Amino acid sequence: MTAVDFGSFVEELAAKSGEVILPFFRTSLSIDNKGTVGRFDPVTAADRAAEAAMRALIHKAFPEHGIIGEEYGSEHPDAEYVWVLDPIDGTKSFICGMPAWGTLIGLTRFGKPVFGTMHQPFLGESFTGDGEAARYRGPAGDRELCVRPCAALDEAVLFTTSPLLMSEQDRGAFRRVEQRVRLSRYGGDCYAYCMLAAGHIDLVIETELKPHDIVPLVPIITGAGGVLTAWDGGPALSGGRVLAAGDRVVHAAALKLLQA
Amino acid sequence: MTAVDFGSFVEELAAKSGEVILPFFRTSLSIDNKGTVGRFDPVTAADRAAEAAMRALIHKAFPEHGIIGEEYGSEHPDAEYVWVLDPIDGTKSFICGMPAWGTLIGLTRFGKPVFGTMHQPFLGESFTGDGEAARYRGPAGDRELCVRPCAALDEAVLFTTSPLLMSEQDRGAFRRVEQRVRLSRYGGDCYAYCMLAAGHIDLVIETELKPHDIVPLVPIITGAGGVLTAWDGGPALSGGRVLAAGDRVVHAAALKLLQA
């Protein structure tokens, strides 16, 4: 069974997660209840309910698979197949009502990411990849995802979620790249990586990531022809400080500045 | 004829604008053609085509009305009714494939904003107001927009499109507020004001705005119960440095810090 066979199951997971999350987005349920004891945190409630729903589906369909999730920790993380779940990547966008958040669902086999999806239930769109190819489905149609060429750093469009999330030292390294690019933009979370896979931007630089923030995105980025590493040039699967690029030339140039 | 009667005409304008813009968003048409003479700028092409289409509809329906637009300047700006058009507010989001951009359509009578819409054709949603009330229609339902209370600056969620857009002095003033709020987020353009009107965030602080960036949003913000001024406390209709808040207490506290 190849990873690609998991495609329709992943759609089922994504649909279920979306059903559970949407009642909490931009509704009266989403208003957080300031000042009460045991304050209600709507995004955490949505995150947990969606992860629990996805875990239940995985338990039923693939009881031998492992699961690593943001909210409920790890089950059988040494299994051949392990699901990596982040029901709401971009929780700060979510609580602000901004649509740049998504549900991340990844699958690893022997520790290697083999399938990944970013699903946005409010927009009804998904970005999916298996490391060989990547695909978009949603209001912009149904089409292959492919990074764009970018000949040099000074032609690149860069994204980061927020420089405020970086340590002072990391922010200094980030600024060295930022000062050289054509355009630097903030916000985005998982959307930035998907826009890179779709050929709309050229670079994403982030820090402080968890594995569940990045593992599901790896097969989308590499499937679209992009390159993703840690700031030290090694694998990015454990999260931390991440550099993604559509073009290897730009990746190399940014890596050099981050390490300077 | 009251401003409210213009509602269905504004929907027609928004629908036409969306039809014209969407073929340029996240499609092969939207890839800018680097390195050629007379470089093709897709967002400018979409902006111009949409504004031309809206102007044609206004000329036909209301030949006596004035028009102020981002792309084609002013026609009869001293007319009783003047339309204020910004087909793509958030052009940098647009070129990056991010959905946080919108079409702004405003109407002034004797210089006072009486009707405004932010329409997002990719998401299929609109935020509309007339200064007395404001309404949302889209994937999150059909409902009244209402700002939320916020008792103090340290409970507030703040948005700005990017501190990189500010002069050094303005950025210093902005930082004084930013250091005091609960959460500061970047990105958003017109969406930030609409999220304020919808009660999801508490403050928007921006600089360097043009009248067409802000006039259409005024009746939405005030219709939802919010307050919007320039940094000097005066009217914000001419753009420049703008401060919007859902709660007057937070507006006053932020204004004091901006003026410190």
Image (tube, coloured by chain):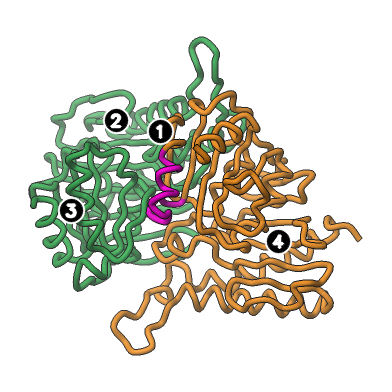
Chain colours: A orange, B green
Residue displayed at 20% across by 51% down: B2
Q: Which of B70 and A102 is in front in this view?
A: A102
Question: Is tag 3's residue or tag 2's residue first in the polypeptide sequence?
Answer: 2
Q: Please identify the dominant SS of the magenta region.
A: helix
Dot 4 falls on which chain? Answer: A
Query: Residue A59 bears which disc, if any?
Result: none
In three-dimensional space, the C-alpha distance between marks 3 and 2, rounded to whole angstroms, equals 22 Å
Examine the rendering and report whether any part of residue B96 can be seen: no
Dot 3 falls on which chain? Answer: B
**Residue, disc 3:** B228
Give the vertical position of A38 relative to A91 (above or below): below
Residue displayed at 33% across by 26% down: B71
Percent of width and height locating residue A238: 64, 59
In three-dimensional space, the C-alpha distance between marks 1 and 3, rounded to whole angstroms, equals 33 Å
**Residue, disc 1:** A179
Give amino acid for label 1. Answer: Gln
Magenta part of the protein: which range?
A161-175
